Amino acid sequence: MGLAIIFFKKEFFMKKHIAAIIALFLILSLSGWAGGKQEEAPTPEAEKQAEKKALPPMAKIIYLTTDYHDNPDIHDAWQDAFKNIAGVEAQLKTVSSKDAGESMVAMFMGGEKLDVIKYGEDDISPLARQEFIIPLDKFIENSPEMKKLKSMFPSSFAAHSWNGVVYGIPERSGSNRGLWVRTDILKELGLSMPGTLDEFVDTLKKIRDNYPAADGSRMFPYISKTYHHGYIAVLGNYFDVSL
């Protein structure tokens, strides 16, 4: 479960539209949807059912997100999803992913009218404290699917809460990231592929302590790169403290 989140601007939404848009992001999160258009067209019967459930349309909402949505295919797919699932039209506005948090706060402080924002991992307390965003707890409680998601990923929801109140919906990334493993090192040390988080940490410790680097220093057994921040995080020497 990724930490990119969705907020709702305080003044603009009717309650039924908030619930519909939360449902939209739940659908996109659970499907791991990454912005591509669906390959299979809905059946005529499904379209009829969708029309029956559609809410009265709003004129338009403004959805602020990062610049990768500038891709025309992604832009069109998002607009189609908002219109078909939530019954609203969405105008996408983008900011640079390099300084998205600062740009968004500046836009709020400048009085710009935004309805929904994708905010990232930044501290949400300044926005919550000034009531630029609204609590989502009551909408989550009214959605059995969202309640289940919250119970499955409590830390993700807690990361986007302030004073015990949830202000953001975690978003699941649709990208296919994974780990590259030096199986030759595992074989040399007689280690098996870890299957749990505890086994993973234990394996890293054993590699660190028993497989020195080329210069004789302790091995850094795990290196990660966060794709959109452009930095390398090395965690090798920190396994003597609680994780």
Image (cartoon, helix red, strand yellow):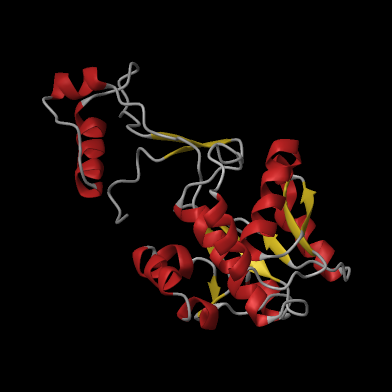
Q: Nearer the viewer, residue 151 or 87?
A: 87
Whether residue 163 is visible to the viewer of this picture, yes or no, is no
Q: How many marks?
A: 0
In the rendered image, residue 138, in percent from the top left (x then y), is placed at: 53, 83
Q: Quadrant of residue 71?
A: top right
In the rendered image, residue 188, in percent from the top left (x then y), is placed at: 15, 19
The quadrant of the image that shows the C terminus is bottom left
Q: Nearer the viewer, residue 212 or 121?
A: 121
Q: On the picture, is 164 further left or further right than 75?
A: left
Q: On the picture, is 23 further left or further right than 243?
A: right
Residue at x-position 27% and y-position 49%: 240
Q: Quadrant of residue 54?
A: bottom right
Residue at x-position 48% and y-position 80%: 142
Q: On the picture, is 99 further left or further right than 149?
A: right
Residue at x-position 69% and y-position 75%: 133
Whether residue 181 is visible to the viewer of this picture, yes or no, is yes
Q: Quadrant of residue 112?
A: bottom right
In the rendered image, residue 209, in percent from the top left (x then y), is placed at: 22, 33
